[in-house]
Amino acid sequence: MYYNNNTILFLDGKYVKAAEATMDLYSQSLHYGYSVFEGIRSYRTETGETKIFKPVEHFERLRISAESLNLPYPWHADELIKATYEVLAKNNFQNAYIRPVVYAPANMTFATNTVSHIVIEAWEMAPFLGDKLLRIVTSSFQRPNPKAFKIHAKAAGHYVNSILASQEAKAKGYDEALLLDMNDHIAEGPGANMFFEKNGVLYTPQAGNILAGITRATVLEICAAEGFTVIEGQFTMEDLRKADSAFYCGTAAEVIGWQSIDDTVFPLDWKDTKGAIIQQLYTHRVTEKQVVKKESLA
């Protein structure tokens, strides 16, 4: 599903076959979930080139995540971006999902490590949440208290919370979960940020109790360019149930609309929402499609 006998990955400075790559089973990362990672996408652009979307931002966040968890990080973004393009080329990938992971050596204590390992993997993947409107359910799981974790770090251990919430939602017959924070304010999905629309205005949970994603930042850039009003704040489920529409956004999910929350169907047809416009403009941006605005036509 993710690799075959010919798949190549980058491991500690070398390009090796995924089927032959190994890691230490005494790794602190395996035993304690002590690692950090990124989710990055590459796309075939309109000109036929392979382009990684916002690679600098992603590898900068990887560095920040590692340093937040006291994982040594001796690499520079330029060398990792170059290695990532090489992994894509060696596997003949254009539209791909890319997963760099920084992980710890063998260490059964809680002492700080003096070295880290890095692996960069890639595989072809359809949009993580599909391409149909989603039926979302409020999760019984909350997002972790930011006083207990470095909530801004994209850390492997944090995602046990995401897995449990997503599995619970699917067991109930829904497509995905929505998690609240410890104060019962809307937070985010298991692997995506969320926006909702009311009377033409977009709302999104503020940073602090969420992992404010790079795709979220891109959506905010698109909104600014289009003149869409966005309010960041603390919102309740009552606010969401009164909304006209909602959507998730994330590197893996891209931009995907919701059909309903807890069986309450949003009244606005998706094609008439700000989210649908953002969804199209996001696709144009990552594929570098040039769009000529109607008012510029003579």
Image (cartoon, helix red, strand yellow):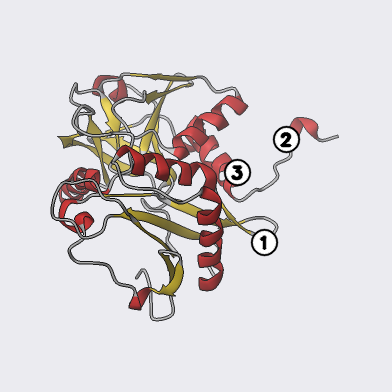
The reply to whether residue 54 is in sight is: no
Residue 208 position by quadrant: top left
- The picture places residue 103, in percent across and down from the top left corner, at 30, 55
Question: Which residue sits at x=31%, y=31%?
Answer: 210
Label whose residue precedes the other's in the sequence (2 or 1): 1
Q: Residues within 10 Å of mark 1 (few under 14, many from 20)?
A: few
Task: Tell me the SS state at disc 2.
Answer: loop
Location of mark 2 (residue): 293
Question: Which residue sits at x=60%, y=43%?
Answer: 285
Q: Residues within 10 Å of mark 2 (few under 14, many from 20)?
A: few
CA gap, disc 3 and disc 1:
14 Å
Location of mark 1 (residue): 48
Residue 176 position by quadrant: top left
Pointers 2 and 3 in contact (C-beta within 8 Å): no
- The picture places residue 212, in percent across and down from the top left corner, at 38, 33
Callout 1 amino acid: Gly
Please state which of the two labelled residues, at mark 2 or mark 3, is closer to the viewer: 3
- Residue 8's disc is none
Relative to the observer, which residue lies in front, 95 or 203?
95
Task: Name the image quarter holding the N terminus.
Answer: bottom left
Callout 3 amino acid: Arg
- The picture places residue 221, in percent across and down from the top left corner, at 55, 30
Task: Tell me the SS state at disc 1.
Answer: loop
Label whose residue precedes the other's in the sequence (2 or 3): 3
Q: Residues within 10 Å of mark 3 (few under 14, many from 20)?
A: some
Relative to the observer, which residue lies in front, 113 or 228?
113
- Residue 285's disc is 3
Relative to the observer, which residue lies in front, 295 or 178?
178
Task: Tell me the SS state at disc 3.
Answer: helix
CA gap, disc 2 and disc 1:
23 Å
